[in-house]
Amino acid sequence: MFKQTICILFLLVTLAACGRNNQNTEPPHENTITETPTAYSPPTETGTESPTPIAEIAPHNDYIIHLEIDTETRTVQGISRINFTNRSEQPLDTVVMRVYLNASNNGYMEIQYASANNQTLKYDLNGTILTFYFDEPILPNVTVQMLLQYNAYVPQLAHRIGGSDIAMWFGMFLPTLAVFGESGWYTDAFYPVGEPFFLEVANYNVTIVTPISYTVVGTGVRTEEVIEDTDTRITHFTAQMVRDFAFALSPYFNHAYAVTESGIDIHFYYHTETIDVDHIMEFIKFCMEYFESRVGIYPFGQVTIVETEIIGGAVAFSQVVFVDTHQFFQNMWWLAHGLGDQWFASVVGANRVAEPWLDEGLTRFVKAGIFYPTYEALRTRIEWEHYSIHDRQDLFITDGLSVYTNRAHYAHTQGRKAKVMLYALYRQMGYENFWQLINQYYYEFAFGIATSADFVRIAEEIYGDSLQQFFREWMHMGTVPELPPRLE
């Protein structure tokens, strides 16, 4: 309990840093990225230290980005300035970024120029993997200022990134630093099934230039200015401690606004006039308040929902959810899923390539309470889902995305079986212990990276006994175990 209290206090302090409850007023139009730490200089040959000071290491990498968008040709010219700090314990002679646009159909990004500390960099772009080569290795705790210039073409009617005659949307669009771990840079292949992303939190300062008729919305705090003489709109965003930066733009956006009981600003941007906006806003507000009550406080001041024409139901990014138009006329299951991802994919991070259940399964189970609010309704639903997969022998929750060749196999394993497993754990641990597990997991790994081992550890600490056999049967075997006895 003491550890959880400390985590809660830390998260509350973070809320102030992220600008929670202060988003109703327009913030000043300024660069909020902190000054880059001074690089460390090694001792001189005489053994005395260089007079260059060792500055305090920034807690996160910084992205300072300028984008100019041609909406007629769906092309983008971009410059990213990245303050990268080597937080490993070894010198690095390469830095790796991911360019996920290059995995989309017909979309692509081309690198025009790269440098570090004003020195030209050699680089290699192979699919989604962009590798930079340094002549002088980056020492531990040293920060370098990287500059990247690129051109991009946005495909029409794609999934996370796309455009149409009505809008353009950009999810996982920007070149993003890969994660560096014990085995080096994570350079997993891009898989078409699931959410093949593994990201650390960072700070973003983004400027987007568009025609004056376009409204731009996205992650973080937004300001804009209009340059009427040039028919140009400049929109500026600042976002701290987020895993990605997503945005959308359209000349046809309508805007609806609401606020939750805890002060989260809800922004809904849509273009279809027949949408029941009041009902949708009530549903979003209910979902946000539900996840806060079940999981933990939402550490940002706003969430933005955008109507798009994506292929599929919805896709979620930090503080942003893109939703397909048709979902607003259905049960909005995917909208609720995207909102749940704010907790289990954006605030708490995981390797969604190697352990996708930590996002998919947790979001599905916790979200189920929105649509099945009583225990009896939830029990009936999940027992039916358990029955639907009971005879399967190929559902290994420990599998990563490389195993799946179709969406159904992934959904049955990382979604349905993981969801049923969590319900079985709920029945085994009991109501209070299970929700304490979810709370502690969330607060302990907010803004960090969690693993399956972390989740199991916390579960055992709270349960007070070993759960190794439980997780071995559910996660490591392809069969589906029987459910524990029902809760009274």
Image: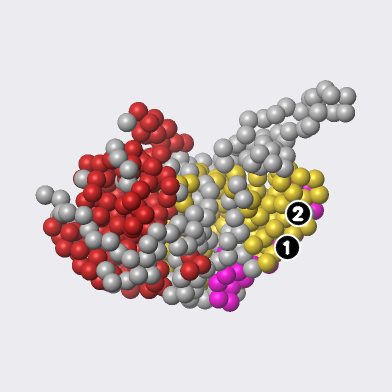
Disc 1: CA contacts within 10 A as few (<14), some (14-19) or many (>=20): few
Q: Which residues fall within the magenta stretch?
A: 100-120
**Quick one: SS at disc 1?**
strand
Question: Who's the residue at 72% across and 35% down the image?
Answer: 39
Q: For the residues labelled 2 and 1, say whether their Cβ atoms are less than 8 Å apart.
A: yes
Please indicate, yes or no, whether residue 345 appears anywhere in the rendered image: yes
Q: Is residue 13 above or below residue 108?
A: above
- Point out which mark residue 133 bears: 2
Residue situated in front as seen by the camera: 297 or 453: 453
Residue situated in front as seen by the camera: 443 or 112: 443
Question: Who's the residue at 42% across and 50% down the image?
Answer: 452
Q: Which residue is mark 1?
A: 124
465 displayed left or right of 175: left
The spot of residue 43 in percent (x, y) is: 81, 28
Q: CA distance from mark 2 to mark 1?
A: 8 Å
Residue situated in front as seen by the camera: 328 or 275: 328
Asked whether residue 113 is drawn in magenta, I would say: yes
Asked whether residue 305 is drawn in magenta, I would say: no
Report the residue that reaches farthest toward the right: 46
Residue situated in front as seen by the camera: 481 or 368: 481
- Point out which mark residue 231 bears: none
**Quick one: SS at disc 2?**
strand
Q: Is residue 298 above or below residue 273?
A: above
Please indicate, yes or no, whether residue 287 appears anywhere in the rendered image: no
Q: Label 2 amino acid?
A: Tyr
Task: Kindly indicate the quadrant of the structure image that contains residue 66.
Answer: bottom right
The spot of residue 396 in percent (x, y) is: 40, 64
Q: Is residue 413 above or below residue 304?
A: below
The spot of residue 232 in percent (x, y) is: 58, 61
- The numbered mark, 2 or 1, whose residue comes first in the sequence reads 1
The spot of residue 193 in percent (x, y) is: 46, 69
